[in-house]
Image (tube, helix red, strand yellow):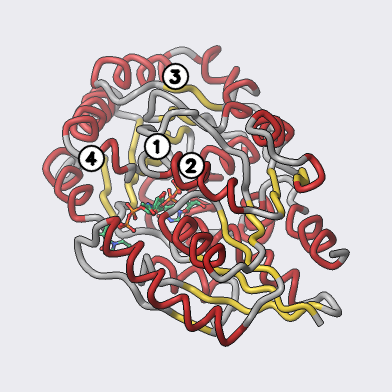
Amino acid sequence: MKTILLVFGTRPEAIKMCPLVNELKDRRGIRPMVCVTGQHDDMLSRVLDTFSVTPDFDLAVMKPEQSLFDVTALILERLRPVLGSVKPDVALVHGDTTTTFAAALACFYERIPVGHVEAGLRTWRTDCPYPEEFNRQAVSIISRYNFAPTEQAKLNLLREGRDPVTVYVTGNTAIDALRATVRADYTHPELDWASGSRLALITAHRRENLGEPMRQMFRAIRRVVDEHPDVKAIFPVHPNPAVRAAAGDILAGHERIHVIEPLDVLDFHNFMSRSHIILTDSGGIQEEAPSLGKPVLVLRSVTERPEGVAAGALRLVGTQERSVYREFTRLLDEPGAYEAMARTTAPYGDGHASRRIADVLCGL
Ligand code: UD1
Ligand code: UDP
């Protein structure tokens, strides 16, 4: 019996790891155990409920206004005894958050083999996204098993000198999650409110966008909505107080913009599938939207997800008011530009990534 310890702590890690937890529960010879760091609290527990995953350990590290130091130090300190008692054969981490980095580092110190899910994404710029690009590169140095979502991600790892036998191209487990959530008969009062209008779905939270970049993008969005009476916008706002303040100042109070609490993942995926256009600086949404045929204006200047750009589903528009205003307007006013982006493509997988990762782990 092999013990696999899955460690994760934020909303997107949970959305992409829970399908794998549930897949591993069904495999003979594998005992999956889950340790959540609690880097996010409410947003995390809602995902766990959605996928019926009960953690074996909760490090409960989140505190208001937490810094990178707080999160890193608390995870190192509190994960150590968990690793000591579980003694996993492999520990799995996901992606590029502080949880990912600190958990992988703790495993390295305890000489526990690390498997990295969603390995090989790169911008090659440690300032963007910050601190995620550092986290993902650092974890690659430590990882024994690299589960790359795409061929491009695999190439990135090989370019860094990783041993090819450690890299498995699996697709992204985000698409596995999407298969479980989107429903044709889904309804929600916010979607009733938006019905008859073109719905723009907005999210923003990147650390390097906090402050003036975020204010600029929000001003652009408000102006465009102002000028298009048939457009309504919904912004489920991240709990980060800095995001809340900017959204409250600039977007709230407009009759066609609803600033609401974060949505549960089942709701959010269905909102995406009913939206006309998505504006976001999120990573995961760049993967999910192309599978739903929804154009995304990416509120960043670089992306580690170039496959969606190449497929025509994502467009990088930066954070400056002028460029966000111009590209958002163009997509609303030029049907040809919209149609060119609104094609369903699957650059991030077929929804069976968890099965492939579990197959590898079973065969170790
Ligand atoms: C983190 C990750 C980022 C990921 C994002 C997903 C790091 C450095 N950043 O960013 O890579 O894209 O999660 O959402 O790991 N907060 C709450 N309640 C919550 C969650 C957060 O109040 O449920 C507050 C925290 O107290 C903190 C702020 O939001 O003050 C930021 O949280 P933090 O986890 O530090 O970073 P995120 O911006 O969420
Ligand atoms: N998401 C959600 N509720 C929301 C907004 C986003 O469930 O109100 C989901 C979204 O579908 C995606 C993930 O959260 O799966 C993305 O999380 P986030 O943007 O916070 O992090 P990132 O992907 O940028 O790391």
Amino acid type at circle 1 is Pro
Is the CB atom of the residue marked by disc 2 within 8 angstroms of ligand 2's nearest atom? yes
Amino acid type for the residue under numbered disc 4: Leu
Image spot of residue 205 (x, y percent): 32, 45
Task: From the viewer's side, name the closer residue of 33 and 76.
Answer: 76
Provide the residue designation for mark 3. Answer: 331
Position above or below: 142 against 330 = below
Measured Cα–Cα span from mark 1 to mark 3: 26 Å
Q: Are marks 2 and 1 in contact (CB under 8 Å)?
A: yes
Residue type beneath disc 2: Gly
Which corner quadrant holds the N terminus?
bottom right
Name which of mark 1 and mark 3 comes first in the sequence: 1
> Counting other residues with Cα less than 10 Å from the Cα at mark 3, is it few (<14), some (14-19), or many (20 or more)?
some
**Distance in Å between CA atoms under marks 4 and 1:** 12 Å
Q: Amino acid at mark 3?
A: Leu
Picture quadrant where residue 288 is located: top right
Q: Nearer the viewer, mark 1 or mark 3?
A: 1
Label 2 environment density (alpha carbons within 10 Å; few <14, some 14–19, many ≥20): some
Find disc 4 in the rendering and name its residue. 210
List the residue tagged with mark 1. 129
At a point 63% along the width and 28% down the height, the residue shown is 307
Query: Who is closer to the viewer here, 340 or 204?
Result: 204
N-terminal of the pair, mark 2 or mark 3, is 2
In the rendered image, residue 193, in percent from the top left (x then y), is placed at 36, 50
Quadrant housing residue 41 = bottom left
Q: Which mark is residue 317?
A: none
> Which residue in the protein does label 2 denote?
283
303 up-or-down from 168: above or below = above
Q: Position of residue 53 (x, y in %)?
A: 59, 77
Comparing 338 with 69, the one in front is 69
